[in-house]
Image (cartoon, coloured by chain):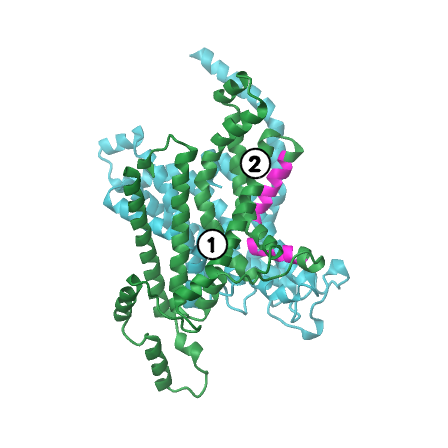
Amino acid sequence: MQFISLLLIRLIQTIFVIWVVVTIVFVVARIFGNPEAALLPPFDTTEADYEKVRERLGIDKPLYTQYGIFLKDAVQGDLGYSFIRAGSAIDIVADKILPTVKLTAAGLVVAIGLGIPLGILAALTRGSPYDWLARLIAVFGQATPSFWLGLMLIFFLAVRVDWFPTAGAEGFRALVLPAVSLGLLSAAGFMRLTRSGMIDVMNTDFIRTARAKGLNERTVIVRHALRHAMIPVATILGLELGTLIAGSVIIEVVFSWPGLGRLMIESILKDDFPTVQAGVAVIAFSIAMGNLLVDISYRFIDPRIQAAEL
Amino acid sequence: MSERIADTAIETRSRWRIRRPRRIRRSLLLVPPLTIMLMFFVFGIFADIIAPGDPGDTNVLNKLARPVFDGGTSESLLGTDHIGRDIWTRIVHGARISLIVVAIVVPGAALFGSTVGVIAGWRSGKLGQALMRYVDVQLALPAIVFAVLLGAALGASIWNVVLILLFWTWAGYARLVRAEVLSLKEREFVIASMAAGGSGFWIMRKQLLPNVFNTIVVIMTLQVPVVIVAEASLSFLGVGAPVEQATWGRMITEARNYLTQAWWVMWMPGLALMLVALSGNLVGDWLRDLLDPRLRNLG
């Protein structure tokens, strides 16, 4: 029961954050943006033409009136129509969610699939060449700007040898390079944290007890040590999810991936206010939900954590 | 008592004997990154002397010229780009832009963020709560989308980039410094100052700030490569410095179309960016282990 009420509080907080974020976007866009200029030819346009376009887009009224109308429509689930594309902002954004989810999930798979095993290996073979190699990968992964990594991968693996397509989202092979470019930074974080966590836990008493009981090494590592080392990893999972969602924006631009991030950048540069607002709301919502899921999953990894700390 | 001191002395001495080779090895490993960071600063400050040419000078007759080590002439050390601009000159002048941005953003965000953090930690009642709720909202924002929005709204100028990155990075300082202050507040020396009648401002300035200083310095160092990469990312997305200025991010964007014909156009600025980011990270890690090992798990 307490758990449910805490979930409700978190949900209300999330809605509040989204409202603040969208309001900031609404105000900033309308103060500085100039969508009518993008819709009309630059010559032979009279002030009356601009006026007509502004009226059609609904941006001729004072800011607070526009905001009132926006809020009234928003609570009914209507975020307006795109200024430059056919259709409502929500439909346009919804179309792009799946490719971005696919890319982010693939990035997360790379981050976890590379980071955690490498971290375990490095911790168990501390000081060995494996350890050095894993740490080298982590240092490079952390320092290489993702867009530069993406371009290098395109250069070597899509241009020099034709293993992967240079752009687009057709099929599984197209997913590989973007996912690696996106996931490597987070993989480095997971690797470092797993490594230090495993090293710490392997020196504790309960590992010695587990060994003394005669458990085989595999059980000791997987059932006892790893589970313990995963607690801090789960903590940064939420943070890394945010990093991945934000990072996907620039990766989508590099690989011409038809997702939400590229849509956002294009819509911002073309002053398509409704699409930007809807997209930012979706991104903020997904970051918040990611954090919430991680907090809930805590309770299963570490039962010592009580609902009150959620 | 004296026995314990003697023990400590022996322990210290033997620890030195064991650790010393490792320390020396570690410091040797630091020579390349420190050199690269130093070069970055020197290039940025003395760009006009090191590369006297104009980074915007085009020469259509000499476009996509090869770098000197790949069959080119010494006239253009690192080759030229698609409209014949000298890549070496542009990289050196690009370092200046990055340096200007770093030199303002990192101390600026540290000053502002730490001030907010100290105040929020000290006055942890309503004021502190309100400040931290705002910080939470900002950290939940998709920073890059917001930066592009602000960049498009404010227009292309390096001062706008500085403003955007200040806005992007200050909240992290605030959160960490506040956490430090919250625990410092319970320590005896602070309580003693309060009991002796020290004013809030005096305690914040004379007791809290000096004690969180190491943390701030460590985050600042780690932020240097982050800010450099963020600036390059903004330029890459087309909302950074104006077109006529040479920045590493813009050089990389513009080179994308010539990737197949002339590898050096994209590789040179990319390598510069990667080397500086890598070195900055290594130096930052080292400084963190030295000054504040507790921050290790920060990522």
Q: Are marks 1 and 2 on the same chain?
A: yes
Distance, label 1 to label 2, CA atoms, is 24 Å
Q: Residue B281, which numbered label?
A: none
Query: Which residue appears farthest toward the bottom when viewing the image?
Result: A44
Tell which circle, 1 or 2, labels the residue nearer the N-terminal end.
2
**Badge 2: residue crowd in 10 Å (few <14, some 14–19, many ≥20):** many
Image disc number at residue A119: 2
Q: Residue at x 54, y 66 (%)?
A: B245
Q: In the picture, residue A148 is in which quadrant?
A: bottom right
Q: Amino acid at mark 2?
A: Gly
Q: Are marks 1 and 2 in contact (CB under 8 Å)?
A: no
Residue B121 x, y percent position in the rendering: 31, 41
Determine whether the residue tagged by mark 1 lies in a helix, strand or loop. Answer: helix
Percent coordinates x, y for residue A230 in the rendering: 48, 34
Lateral position of residue B243 relative to residue A69, left or right: right
Question: In the rendering, at what x and y percent does residue B20 appear?
Answer: 60, 27
Give me the chain letter of mark 2: A
Q: Which chain is cyan?
A: B
Residue identified by numbered label 1: A246
The three-letter amino acid code for the residue at tag 1 is Ala
Quarter assignment of residue A86:
bottom left
Q: Crowding near pointer 1: few (<14 within 10 Å), some, many (20+)? A: many
Image height check: is A31 above or below B36? below
The image shows residue A7, relative to residue B83, as above or below, that is: above
Q: Residue furthest toward the right?
A: B71
- B105 horizontally vs B54: left or right: left
Instruction: Tell me what residue is drawn at x 59 percent, y 69 percent.
Output: B56
Q: B231 or A117, which lies in front?
A: A117
Q: Position of residue A210 (x, y in %)?
A: 51, 20
What is the drawing colour of chain A?
green
Q: Which residues are magenta?
A: A131-155
